[in-house]
Image: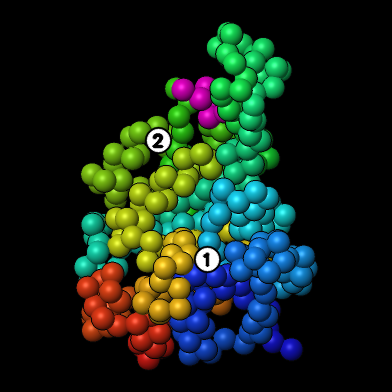
């Protein structure tokens, strides 16, 4: 039996392309792993009327982790719900991990002084919002609501932050900082406006910070963080944020380091984790093998660390850094003409 069991979930669009590329790199390590393919995404919806089949959920109950490519989002299709959002909820993958690092030689770097790790709460806040359309009378009666509002002319959303959810995501960020030798954790908020939700988040974060002497703790308004990410990103080290601002900040940070083609991510729970590139499915490029696979390959690095393979993870990142630095093989977004698979083969060659 293989040491590691990995659910392999390419999805659709360029998810298939970048997963094929990542497998070339993983096979070059080599890694003692079994890759069990599972179905997920829009093609499943077309075939079964379900974007996340029960068989895939059952598969994830039996593996150490999952590797996910991308799926096409269909927000206006009745009954369709993002399968990755469902997986975060079903498996309590509460910690969204987003490393944003500038590799020397990348022509797409907007800044060369970026090495930030962002933790986003994945299962609360807007990630688990309840939406109302039309507005129910109970909401219209709440203090602060506009009087005389026609319930058919407005929509509303309700989201929640819990003590346990706050403490565990902040603790995960501090534990990561201690493990990796990082010096500071920044908690991002908008407590001047969201007085209760973000104020509560800060109260709990401060209590957790007291458990980690030797690691600096700071609180910053999300507006200021957005500015300083552009002006001087080196002031940040580890950043932890609620889901409402997490999507925005992770996208902004990713653009500093070459865009979504270089942005890996992880969804981490207590028992299982799912790793993926941050980019979407880009269906117009599906099957053309022109997409940049580096985000997916770097997501595999995160997966190796999760699996307890730090040497393999370090070797993989060194190989990626060497390919970017040398610049001999580049996909179209980097100004080159090489394919997705050629980029992966070059990384494998370095390994």
Is residue 297 at all visible to an observer of this figure? Answer: no
Picture coordinates of residue 239, whole percent (x, y):
44, 47
Q: Is residue 57 above or below residue 336?
A: above
Question: Label 1's element?
Answer: strand
Q: For the magenta stretch, what is the residue range?
A: 193-199
Q: Are marks 1 and 2 in contact (CB under 8 Å)?
A: no
Would you say 165 lies left or right of 216 here? right
The residue identified by callout 2 is 222
Q: Which residue is mark 1?
A: 70
* Nearer-the-camera pick, 43 or 272: 43
Position above or below: 334 against 220: below
In which quadrant is the N terminus drawn?
bottom right
Rendered-image quadrant of the C terminus: bottom left
- Is residue 247 something one can see in this rendering? yes
Of the numbered discs in the image, which one, if any, rests on residue 239?
Answer: none
270 with respect to 169 (left or right): right
Secondary structure at numbered mark 2: helix
Residue under the image location 52 percent in, 66 percent down: 70
Q: Nearer the viewer, mark 1 or mark 2?
A: 1
Q: Earlier in the sequence, mark 1 or mark 2?
A: 1
Mark 2: few, some, or many residues within 10 Å (few <14, many ≥20)? some
Q: Residue at x 42, y 45 (%)?
A: 248
> Image point 21% across, 68% down: which residue?
107
Residue in the image at 49% along x and 70% along y = 13
Which of 235/247 is in front?
A: 247
State which quadrant residue 346 falls in.
bottom left
């Amino acid at each position: 039996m293989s040491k590691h069991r990995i659910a392999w979930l390419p999805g659709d669009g360029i998810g298939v392309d970048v997963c094929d590329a990542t497998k070339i790199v993983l096979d070059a390590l080599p890694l003692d792993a079994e890759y069990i393919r599972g179905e997920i995404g829009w093609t499943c919806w077309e075939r079964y009327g379900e974007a996340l089949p029960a068989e895939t959920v059952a598969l994830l109950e039996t593996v150490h982790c999952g590797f996910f490519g991308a799926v096409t989002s269909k927000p206006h299709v009745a009954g369709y719900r993002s399968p990755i959002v469902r997986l975060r909820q079903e498996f309590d993958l509460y910690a969204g991990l987003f490393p944003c690092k500038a590799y020397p030689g990348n022509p797409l770097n907007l800044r060369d002084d970026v090495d930030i790790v962002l933790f986003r709460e994945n299962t609360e806040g807007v990630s688990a919002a309840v939406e109302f359309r039309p507005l129910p009378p109970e909401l219209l009666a709440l203090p602060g609501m506009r009087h005389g509002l026609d319930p058919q002319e407005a929509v509303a959303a309700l989201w929640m932050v819990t003590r346990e959810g706050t403490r565990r995501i902040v603790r995960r960020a501090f534990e990561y900082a201690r493990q990796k030798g990082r010096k500071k954790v920044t908690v991002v908020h908008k407590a001047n406006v969201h007085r209760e939700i973000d104020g509560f988040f800060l109260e709990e974060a401060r209590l957790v910070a007291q458990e980690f002497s030797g690691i600096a703790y700071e609180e910053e308004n999300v507006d200021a963080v957005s500015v300083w990410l552009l002006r001087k990103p080196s002031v940040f080290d580890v950043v932890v944020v609620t889901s409402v601002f997490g999507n925005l900040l992770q996208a902004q940070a990713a653009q500093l380091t070459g865009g979504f083609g270089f942005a890996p991510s992880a969804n981490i729970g207590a028992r299982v984790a799912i790793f993926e590139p941050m980019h979407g499915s880009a269906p117009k490029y599906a099957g053309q093998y022109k997409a940049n696979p580096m985000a997916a390959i770097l997501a595999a690095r995160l997966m190796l660390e999760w699996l307890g393979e730090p040497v393999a993870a370090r070797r993989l990142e060194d190989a990626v850094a060497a390919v970017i630095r040398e610049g001999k093989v580049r996909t179209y977004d980097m100004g080159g003409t090489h394919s997705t698979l050629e980029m992966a083969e070059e990384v494998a060659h370095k390994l």
